[in-house]
Image: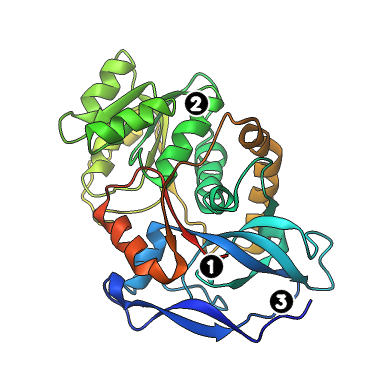
């Protein structure tokens, strides 16, 4: 297959508000060892993209400066050392950058087949949130059937994924949201109790829901005053996993409850991990989660799609925080 030398891509004039994102052109990437080249049909939009746009989340060494952490499309080239996927295979992939473009290079280990019955738009909404939720909720957070799970930001891409997966694996699920509409949406996705944090105290609701016992696992991307409140809401031997900070990452804490309850407070980031580590997560997803996706028990929730040239509008929508689920760019 003959490939063009130049492709459409979204460029960033300088760090700043959404309108710094403009249509442009870039050289088509070349596969390095262990990589494939994907002709992108759709690319997910995620909050880390917004942070990178503001200059607060630089790409790791060697990653392209083009935004975009997840894509779906067709493999058009592969390095000689790649056994799968091969040219012609349709895949979705987690990438360290480069998704907002017509072509994107991806480590083969971080590619997964398009789930049966999925459109490219749906498939592009899977990698970033499903990799993140699996490694933090089930591997680091050790959630098991019968436990209680509280997810903050329940209507976000991460939240809608976490609510569905936790419920599918037998947990009792609570989720915080900022509007009645978002609460209703996460309830439809399977949450046992949606908490409107503007009108309710989530610590009090968590204690009431659990008969005073507290929550076994809390997934938090808020930070700030939520850190101390999470400790209050947690059960004895509970775990709290921090994955982002919509509020401050600097807090003053009273840690006596951590000792008294024997809590584990941990956290992680996904983007800086090695290809081997991300590949292991991909294999776990293919084994444990792909059957749920293909059976329809779990599905990414798509709020809105945008043309690639309208990436600035997608970022403005992300920052308006009215969406429920995922925002996706249509590329192909």
Between circles 2 and 1, the one closer to the viewer is 1
Residue 190, placed above or below residue 283: above
- Dot 3 alpha-carbon crowd within 10 angstroms: few under 14, some 14 to 19, many 20 or more: some
Name the residue nearer the viewer: 232 or 192. 192
Q: CA distance from mark 2 to mark 3?
A: 39 Å
Residue bearing the label numbered 2: 167
When asked about the image quadrant of residue 168, the answer is top right
Residue 83, placed above or below residue 227: below
Residue bearing the label numbered 3: 31
**Drawn side of residue 229 relative to residue 270, left or right:** left
**Drawn side of residue 276 relative to residue 102, left or right:** right
Which residue is rendered at x = 23% and y = 45% of the image? 253
Indicate which disc, 1 or 3, sits on the residue closer to the N terminus: 3
**Residue 180: x %, y % from top left:** 23, 31
**Residue 259: x %, y % from top left:** 34, 34
Which residue is rendered at x = 71% and y = 80% of the image? 3
Residue bearing the label numbered 1: 99
């Amino acid at each position: 297959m003959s490939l063009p030398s130049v492709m459409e891509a979204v460029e960033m004039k300088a760090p700043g508000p959404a309108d710094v994102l403009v249509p442009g052109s870039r050289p088509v990437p070349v596969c390095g060892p262990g990589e494939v080249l994907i002709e992108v049909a759709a690319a997910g939009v995620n909050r880390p993209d917004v942070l990178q746009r503001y200059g607060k989340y630089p790409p790791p060494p060697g990653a392209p400066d083009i935004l975009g952490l997840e894509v779906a499309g067709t493999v058009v080239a592969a390095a000689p050392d790649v056994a799968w996927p091969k040219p012609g295979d349709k895949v979705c992939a987690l990438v360290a950058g480069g998704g907002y473009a017509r072509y994107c290079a991806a480590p083969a280990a971080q590619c997964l087949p398009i789930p049966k019955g999925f459109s490219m738009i749906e498939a592009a909404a899977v990698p970033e949130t499903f990799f993140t939720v699996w490694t933090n909720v089930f591997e680091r957070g050790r959630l098991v059937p019968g436990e209680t799970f509280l997810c903050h930001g329940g209507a976000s891409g991460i939240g809608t994924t976490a609510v569905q997966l936790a419920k599918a694996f037998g947990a009792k699920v609570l989720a915080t949201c900022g509007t009645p509409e978002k609460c209703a949406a996460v309830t439809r996705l399977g949450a046992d109790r949606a908490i409107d944090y503007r009108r309710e105290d989530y610590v009090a609701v968590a204690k009431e829901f659990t008969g005073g016992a507290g929550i076994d696992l809390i997934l938090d991307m808020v930070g700030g005053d939520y850190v101390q409140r999470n400790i209050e809401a947690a059960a004895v031997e509970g775990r709290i996993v921090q994955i982002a900070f919509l509020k401050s990452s600097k807090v003053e804490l009273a840690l006596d409850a951590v000792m008294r309850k024997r809590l584990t407070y941990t956290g992680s980031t996904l983007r800086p991990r090695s290809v081997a580590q991300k590949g292991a997560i991909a294999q776990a997803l293919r084994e444990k989660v792909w059957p749920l996706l293909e059976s329809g028990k779990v599905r990414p929730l798509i709020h809105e799609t945008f043309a690639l040239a309208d990436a600035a509008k997608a970022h403005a929508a992300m920052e308006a925080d009215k969406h429920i689920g995922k925002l996706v760019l249509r590329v192909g």
